[in-house]
Amino acid sequence: PPRRPAPPLRSGGIRRHTFAPRARRGDPRVDLNFALDLDGFQERTLKLAYTLYESSRKRLEICARRRATGVGHKNLPLRPVKARPCGPTACNCTIDYRHLTAPNMMGIDASIAVRWMKNHRAKLKRARQARERQALAPPVAPPAR
């Protein structure tokens, strides 16, 4: 098949060096590892926020306290969603990553924190699935002598 011409530049000019590799974005997980501090304080902060957020009972308590007093939780700052207001039995808030990262994350972007949370959630899911597979597998008998 014939080679398609390179797409035009936004400026309208001609692209030179069409075979030159284009710059790629860095891997966000690698960027996050570089951004995290050496003693792991920032990672512990993210894990704590994620643990509190995943516990529906704790998240409901923190959300109710925030609605009643207007004061947010220091380990799990929540941001209400205007389209879906929270009720006494359901919390639709999201984690306020900007507030979470401001004092202790030293400028880690909120999108990196979100990506870290998703990767952490996937890692926990893979570990749980491995434990379930191991529990379902028949026990291996030691070889007879």
Image (cartoon, rainbow, N blue to C red):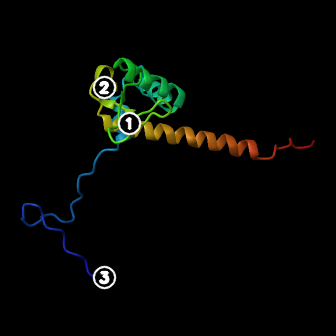
| Residue at 29%, 29% in the rendered image | 98
Q: Are marks 1 and 3 in contact (CB under 8 Å)?
A: no
- Mark on residue 99? 2
Q: Element under label 3?
A: loop
Q: Nearer the viewer, mark 1 or mark 3?
A: 1
Residue 108 vertical placement versus 137 (above, below): above
Residue type beneath disc 3: Pro
Please indicate whether residue 47 sits to the left or right of residue 21 in the image: right
Residue type beneath disc 2: His
Please indicate whether residue 135 sits to the left or right of residue 59 in the image: right
Q: Residue furthest right?
A: 145
Q: Element under label 1?
A: loop
Q: Residues within 10 Å of mark 3 (few under 14, many from 20)?
A: few
The answer to whether any part of residue 66 appears in the image is yes
Labels 2 and 3: the sequence-earlier one:
3
* Residue highlighted by disc 1: 85
* Residue highlighted by disc 3: 1
Q: Residue furthest front?
A: 88
Q: Quadrant of the C terminus?
A: top right
Q: Position of residue 128 (x, y in %)?
A: 62, 40
Q: Nearer the viewer, mark 2 or mark 3?
A: 2
- Mark on residue 123? none
Residue type beneath disc 1: Pro
| Residue at 48%, 28% in the rendered image | 60
Q: Quadrant of the N terminus?
A: bottom left
Nearest to the observer: residue 37 or residue 135 = 135
> What is the CA distance from the residue labelled 2 to the residue labelled 3?
53 Å
